[in-house]
Amino acid sequence: MENKKDKKKKDQKKDTESLEKKISVLEQEKNDFQEKFLRVSADWQNFKRRTEEDKKNIRTESMSFVVLSLFKVIDNFDRALEHVPENIKKDEWFKGVLNTKNEFDAFLKNFGLEKFGEIGESFDISKHEALFSEPGEKDKILKVIEKGILLRDKVIRTAKVAVGNGK
């Protein structure tokens, strides 16, 4: 009888050890799968974020091309307005032209477009392109040759300016 009990205990011990090994293997597999899941989940989130950024950049770049072409016409219109004779500036039709221009500027602003570059501003290399320098307060804009353009706070055309050289 003793033998049967010993054999039964040995069999149970073997079964227990075998089950413990299987449990250990399964726990390791579970941990591996959890780790892989977390990695894939993080990769997916990064992919989604990058895709959204890429879409936004493509929209901005596409819009930049159209905007730069459009602003060539707007710049010419602004130059023409600067040279209107004084006696015409009082006419009602000219005031209507100015109102239309102001409405168009507001329309562009609604789409995130703004002109920048004013006399007296401090020169900023990321926003301004100095075409030449003149006697005047150092690093202050003295003349604006061409206004810069911002598209949703991103410079898509630098302002072309004359800068004071400090003499």
Image (cartoon, helix red, strand yellow):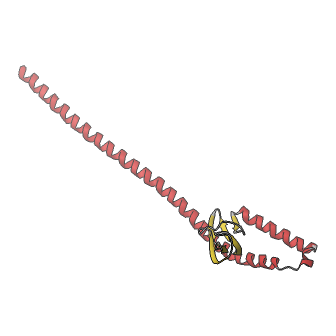
Residue positioned 6% across, 23% down in the render: 3
Image coordinates of residue 23 in percent, x first then y, are: 26, 37
Taking depth in this image into account, of 121 and 13 the one nearest to the observer is 121
Taking depth in this image into account, of 121 and 89 the one nearest to the observer is 121
Residue 108 appears in the picture as rendered:
yes
Farthest residue in the top direction? 1
Q: Quadrant of the N terminus?
A: top left
Left or right of 48 on screen, residue 137: right
Q: Is 64 placed above or below 35 here?
A: below
Q: Is 10 placed above or below 104 here?
A: above
Image coordinates of residue 105 in percent, x first then y, are: 77, 67
Q: Quadrant of residue 94?
A: bottom right
Image coordinates of residue 59 in percent, x first then y, are: 60, 66
Taking depth in this image into account, of 58 and 87 the one nearest to the observer is 87
Q: Quadrant of residue 108?
A: bottom right
Residue positioned 69% across, 69% down in the render: 117
Residue positioned 46% across, 54% down in the render: 44
Residue positioned 77% across, 64% down in the render: 106
Residue 147 appears in the picture as rendered:
no
